[in-house]
């Protein structure tokens, strides 16, 4: 009688429950890769949309600024007023650029004084990671709109949503907890307060170096073999930042990369853009976006560092909290810097036109 009552309640036996769990597990195993692939596809399309919008904004900036590519525009010897009322006159273009970076961040964040005041960046070329703040200021998009962040870049999304995280004793910022074990970039200065407070205003997209400085043989910044995150060049390079690059200088059509994802976060391991198989999203100077394989582009040409036009190779050394090399920390594999140090500056070609299996990837 008790068995009939149990059946009447519509309950499950132990065997039925186990069978249900097995079926659900099988469905999960089948659907998991499909859902992951869909997520990757959505992220890639969202990132491509960001880059297209950046390209359109860059075109508007050029139209409004005598054809110049967006970059820091403050110059040595000129007088500028900071948001706190201070008047500054800097002796060099690099110092003027760091002041402009500080002025924009102060004004956009309202952090003009007090414990959270935006400080002037120390011992860094702001163009390397923060050139986009000039465009964000021009567009009025702000620095927390998500426009300059790859939707798969979870770390930067978190820092951007919590820009005061650097003030806490424990945080997730690069070098916020000091220098980690061997294998990470150990150059000095990463734990400086002026560096920590800027991570939340960074971008997942890097700007090709020739978009903000002169082409060779004019003295310019060039890469260091020991780290991909810092440049050499000294005061002579800093003086030439005043040159200002023009959109008309770009050879079109030349398949020239303008901005690109530093990491291909839609692939396993989030490979650094320099790996040959990376398909990082790229904004081209003609406004199109693609995910062409890095290995199909011309090698980087850095005559200052090599003594010849080709070829610049170096280890990828991660910053703290950044994706590690595909071979793990300390991987000695040399990778190309490719379109970051674009072949022959703005006048050359990064990708040979008409590659049959690459053209469909253009959007």
Image: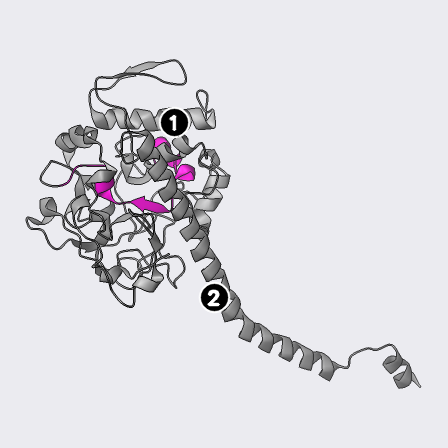
Dividing the picture into quadrants, the one containing residue 72 is top left
Q: Residues within 10 Å of mark 2 (few under 14, many from 20)?
A: some
Q: 210 or 115, which is in the foreground? A: 210
Residue 218 placement, left or right of 281: left
> Going 6% across and 50% down the picture, which residue do you hit?
308
Give residue 77's position: percent from left, percent from top.
Answer: 21, 17
Q: 37 or 329, which is in the foreground? A: 37
Q: Which residue is mark 1?
A: 104
Q: 164 or 285, which is in the foreground? A: 285
Furthest toward the right, the residue is 1
Vertically, is 13 above or below 241?
Answer: below
> Going 44% across and 21% down the picture, which residue do you hit?
112
Residue 301 placement, left or right of 19: left
- Between marks 2 and 1, how big is the CA–CA gap? 39 Å
Give residue 225's position: percent from left, percent from top.
Answer: 17, 49
Q: Which colour scheme appears in the figure? A: one colour
Element under disc 2: helix
196 in magenta:
yes
**In the rendered structure, which segment of residues is drawn in magenta?**
191-215
Q: Earlier in the sequence, mark 2 or mark 1?
A: 2
> Going 39% across and 13% down the picture, which residue do you hit?
85
């Amino acid at each position: 009688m008790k068995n009939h009552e149990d059946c009447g309640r519509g309950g499950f036996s132990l065997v039925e429950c186990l069978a249900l769990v097995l079926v659900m597990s099988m469905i999960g195993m089948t659907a998991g890769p499909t859902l992951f692939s869909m997520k990757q596809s959505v992220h890639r399309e969202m990132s491509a949309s960001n880059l297209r919008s950046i390209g359109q904004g860059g075109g508007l900036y050029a139209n409004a600024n005598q054809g110049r590519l967006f970059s820091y525009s403050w110059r040595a010897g000129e007088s500028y007023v900071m948001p706190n009322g201070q008047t500054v006159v800097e002796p060099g273009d690099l110092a003027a650029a760091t002041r402009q970076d500080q002025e924009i961040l102060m004004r956009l964040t309202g952090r003009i004084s007090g414990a959270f005041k935006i400080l002037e960046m120390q011992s860094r070329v702001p163009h390397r990671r923060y050139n986009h703040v000039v465009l964000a200021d021009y567009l009025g998009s702000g620095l927390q709109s998500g426009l300059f962040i790859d939707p798969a870049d979870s770390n930067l999304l978190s820092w951007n949503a919590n820009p005061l995280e650097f003030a806490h004793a424990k945080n997730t910022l690069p070098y916020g907890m000091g220098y980690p074990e061997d294998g990470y970039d150990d150059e000095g200065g990463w734990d400086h307060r002026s560096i920590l407070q800027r991570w939340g205003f960074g971008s997942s997209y890097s700007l090709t170096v020739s978009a903000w400085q002169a082409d060779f043989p004019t003295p310019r910044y060039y890469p260091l073999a020991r780290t991909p995150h810092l440049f050499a060049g000294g005061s002579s390079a800093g003086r030439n930042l005043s040159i200002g690059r023009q959109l008309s200088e770009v050879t079109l059509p030349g398949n020239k990369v303008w901005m690109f994802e530093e990491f291909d976060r839609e692939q396993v391991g989030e490979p650094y853009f320099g790996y040959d198989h990376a398909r990082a999203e790229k904004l081209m100077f003609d406004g199109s976006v693609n995910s062409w394989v890095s290995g199909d582009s011309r090698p980087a040409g850095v005559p200052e560092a090599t003594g010849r036009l080709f070829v610049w190779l170096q280890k990828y050394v991660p910053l703290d909290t950044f994706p590690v090399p595909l071979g793990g920390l300390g991987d000695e594999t040399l990778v190309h810097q490719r379109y970051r140090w674009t072949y022959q500056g703005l006048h050359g070609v990064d990708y040979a036109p008409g590659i049959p299996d690459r053209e469909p990837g253009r959007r």
